[in-house]
Amino acid sequence: MGGDVAELKVIQLHVDYVEYEPIQPESGVYEEAEKKVYRIEEALLLLTSVEKGDNKMLAEKAIDDAAAFMKKLKISKLVIYPYAHLSVNLAPPSHAIEVIRAMKERAKALGLDFHAAPFGWNKRLVIAVKGHPLAEQLRSYAAEELAKPSEEVPEALLMEEKLESYWYILTPEGEMIPVKDFDFRGHENLEAFAKYEMQKSRAVLEQPPHVSLMKRLEIADHEPASDPGNLRWYARGRLIKSLLEQYVTEKVIEYGGIEVETPIMYDMGHPALKKYLHKFPARQYVIPVEDKKYFLRFAACFGQFLIAKDMQLSYRHLPLWLYELTKYSFRREKS
C-alpha cells in the first residue's frame, strides 16, 4: 500500500475487547512499556500506520473522526495502536512516533478516555470485533482530502448497534421457551444453529466455497477495477442470469404484475426519500451535482411508490402489482 501521496491509514474496529502483550522492542525508537498483558473492553480500536509525509493535521483529523463515531455509537473508550502492516511506504520510526503522539495529544485535548499501546514494540495481539455493519472500517487520511465532506451514514446503520435481541425456541406445540431455559438434549443440531445465530460476529474467516466455484465454472467473479461487491458476469453466468430473469418476469406477468422501469439515481433531498434513506441500513454511492446530492439506488421499491402516487386509481384497480426486476442496484460494501 502507499503511493505518491502519503496517507495516514487506520483500521477502525469497534471491539468487545482488545488484548495485547509487549514482547520486545523491534526498532531503535520505542516507548517504555511494562511486559504484561493489557486488556481493554468495549472500545474503539485504531490500528494505525504512519506513512512518509504524514503530519499532525492528519493525526488530529483521525482522532476527530473517531471521537464523532464514538459519540454516535456511545462508545466510551478509545485505543490507539501503532500498526505498521498497512503500508510499504512507512515513515521513519522517529517521525512515526511523533504522529502517534499527536494522536494521543488530540485525544487528551478532547477529553477522551483513551489507552495507547506502546510504539516500537513487537506485541501479541488478540481482538474480538463486534458484528454490526459499522464495526470494521478502513480509513485513509491525506492532506488534500481534509477539505472533503465526511461520509453520510444512514441513521439505521448507527441504530443497528443499539438493538437488543431476545432469543426463544418455538416448539411444535407453539410454546415460546427462552434459549437459556431450553433443554437441547436430543436437539444437538438445533443447539449448534442457535449458538451460531446468537453470535455477534459474522466475520468471514475463510473464503466461502461458492466464490471459487463460480469463478472456476466461469459464472461470475469480483471486478478488481470496481468497488467490492460489484460483479462481472461471464458468458455462462450471463446466460444463467438472463434465463432466470426471463422466467421470473414471465411468471410475475402471468400472475398479474405490471412491469415498470425506474431510474437508478435519485435526489437525496427529495421529501419522499430523505427519511426513507435513514431508515434503511445500507451504504450508498453518493454523486454531488451542483447544489444537490444524488444516490445510486439500493432497491427499486421507492421508484415504484413514486410511480404509484401519480397513478389515478380506485378500489376497482386493487390489488395492484407493480413489478421491476432491477439489473442495477448498488449497496456500497465496507472497505
Image (cartoon, rainbow, N blue to C red):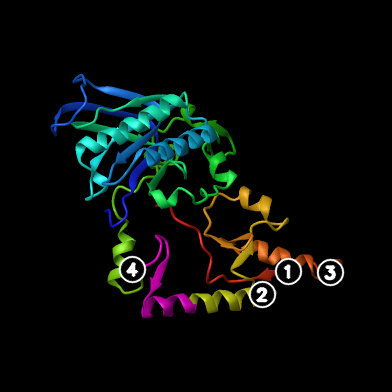
User: In this view of the protein, which residue sits in the foreground, 324 or 231?
Assistant: 231
State the residue position of label 2.
Answer: 260
Task: Rate crowding at label 2 as few (under 14), some (14 to 19) or many (20 or more) other CA atoms within 10 Å.
Answer: few
Q: Would residue 143 be found to the left or right of residue 288 on screen?
A: left
Residue 103 in picture, x, y percent from top left:
36, 33
Q: CA distance from mark 3 to mark 1?
A: 12 Å
- Could you say whether the residue bearing mark 4 is in a helix, strand or loop? helix
Q: Residue at x 28, y 42 (%)?
A: 50
Q: Would residue 168 be found to the left or right of residue 39 on screen?
A: right
Q: Earlier in the sequence, mark 2 or mark 4?
A: 4
Res 214 label? 4
State the residue position of label 1.
Answer: 307
Q: Are marks 2 and 1 in contact (CB under 8 Å)?
A: yes
Res 313 label? 3
User: In this view of the protein, which residue sits in the foreground, 234 or 190?
Assistant: 234
To which quarter of the image does residue 94 belong? Answer: top left
Residue range corresponding to the magenta coloring: 225-243
Residue 290 in picture, x, y percent from top left:
61, 63
Q: Earlier in the sequence, mark 2 or mark 1?
A: 2
Q: CA distance from mark 4 to mark 1?
A: 37 Å
Q: CA distance from mark 2 to mark 1?
A: 9 Å
Please check the rendered image and state whether residue 233 is part of the magenta-colored stretch, yes or no.
Answer: yes
Mark nearest the camera among 2 and 4 is 2
Q: Residue at x 46, y 39 (%)?
A: 65
- Could you say whether the residue bearing mark 3 is in a helix, strand or loop? loop
Q: CA distance from mark 3 to mark 4?
A: 45 Å
Q: Amino acid at mark 2?
A: Val
- Could you say whether the residue bearing mark 2 is in a helix, strand or loop? loop
Q: Residue at x 52, y 53 (%)?
A: 283
Q: CA distance from mark 2 to mark 4?
A: 31 Å
Q: Are marks 4 and 1 in contact (CB under 8 Å)?
A: no
Task: Rate crowding at label 3 as few (under 14), some (14 to 19) or many (20 or more) other CA atoms within 10 Å.
Answer: few
